[in-house]
Image (tube, helix red, strand yellow):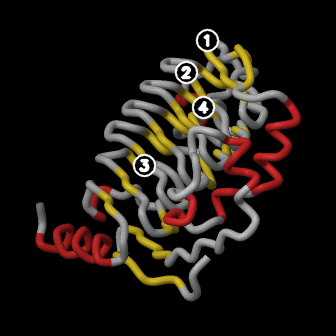
């Protein structure tokens, strides 16, 4: 590890985060905006501007590509691919091969559609979320699933292509959980609630104080503290 990578890893830790890879391994265009308590393994950053919310962890060997946001309290297993490109080759030309626009007057520009991940999303080992997909808060994506369409909040999806298997809660409970915006509350206050009983948690949610997280911005050039906690 270079001295520069070591320095910035230590700096990120002092700001309340953890990024296993050095900044020298960031993609050329990759810029991360991280809230405190984010934990990133040795991931591949082929993304552009990406914000990641507090307490989210992403295991090693994940590929972050065409994704613009990942919410708070997400759990992403190793080998997952988020924002997989799907328009990298022309499908309605003579060929899909790049010889057609290499050394010729033709140009091919891939259409880009960013994916987004809500809060409290669990993505299993080696799952794939295609570009443009919106994964709702509270959703679960099974191991090795390939997600090609939007996932509703609190849905459990599995398969290739992924389909809704069930929902974590009845519709009225899902509405209450979304309305509570519990991920915006102070985590230490949340930990004092009966977390194994969502209904009881919701009943006690109102007086809890809001969370206040610092934020940093990091790229190949290094890092900076962003103004104002969120």
Q: Nearer the viewer, mark 1 or mark 3?
A: 3
Q: Is residue 44 above or below residue 25?
A: above
Q: Name the residue located 54 percent from the left edge and 27 percent from the top edge.
A: 128
Label 3 element class:
strand
Q: Looking at the image, which residue sits at the far bottom?
A: 227
- Percent position (x, y) of residue 21? 27, 55
Q: Based on the displayed image, in which of its 4 quarters is residue 90 positioned?
A: top right
Which quadrant holds the C terminus? bottom right
Depicted 137 relative to depicted 164: above or below: below
- The correct choice, above or below, for 33 with respect to 145 in the image is below
Q: Position of residue 115 (x, y in %)?
A: 67, 43
Mark 1 and mark 3 residues within 8 Å of each other at the beta carbon: no
Between residues 129 and 71, which one lies in front from this camera angle? 71
Neighbour class for label 1 at 10 Å: few (<14), some, many (≥20)? some
In the picture of the structure, the residue carrying the numbered disc 3 is 57
Q: Nearer the viewer, residue 101 or 58?
A: 58
Distance CA(mark 2)–CA(mark 4)? 11 Å
Q: Earlier in the sequence, mark 4 or mark 3?
A: 3
What residue appears at the point 72 percent right and 33 percent down from the top-left corner? Answer: 154
Mark 4 lies on residue: 129
Q: Is residue 45 left or right of residue 110?
A: left
**Spatial distance from mark 4 to mark 3, Cα to Cα?**
17 Å
Circle 1 SS class: loop
Res. 142 mark: 2
Task: Classify the position of the N terminus by image quarter.
Answer: bottom left
Mark 3 and mark 2 in contact (Cβ < 8 Å)?
A: no
Sequence-first disc among 1 and 3: 3
Tell which of 197 and 187 is nearer to you.
197
The residue identified by callout 1 is 159
| Residue 17: image location, x then y, percent | 36, 66
């Amino acid at each position: 590890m270079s001295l520069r990578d070591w320095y910035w890893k230590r700096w990120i830790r002092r700001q309340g985060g953890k990024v296993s890879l050095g900044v020298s391994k960031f993609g050329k265009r990759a810029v991360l905006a991280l809230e405190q308590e984010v934990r990133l393994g040795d991931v591949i950053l082929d993304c552009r501007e990406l914000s990641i919310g507090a307490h989210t962890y992403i295991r090693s060997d994940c590929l972050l590509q065409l994704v613009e946001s990942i919410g708070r309290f997400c759990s992403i297993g190793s080998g997952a691919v988020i924002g997989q490109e799907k328009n990298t080759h022309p499908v309605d030309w003579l060929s899909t091969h790049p010889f057609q626009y290499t050394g010729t007057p033709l140009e091919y520009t891939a259409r880009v559609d960013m994916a987004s991940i809500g809060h409290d999303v669990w993505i299993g080992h080696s799952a794939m979320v295609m570009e443009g997909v919106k994964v709702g808060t509270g959703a679960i994506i099974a191991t090795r699933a390939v997600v090609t369409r939007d996932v509703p909040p609190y849905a459990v999806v599995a398969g290739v292509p992924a389909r809704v298997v069930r929902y974590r809660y009845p519709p009225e409970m899902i509405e209450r959980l979304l309305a509570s915006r519990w991920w915006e509350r102070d985590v230490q206050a949340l930990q004092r609630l009966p977390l194994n009983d969502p209904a009881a948690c919701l009943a006690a949610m109102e007086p809890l104080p809001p969370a206040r997280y610092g934020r940093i911005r990091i790229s190949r050039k290094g890092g900076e503290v962003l103004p104002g906690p969120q």
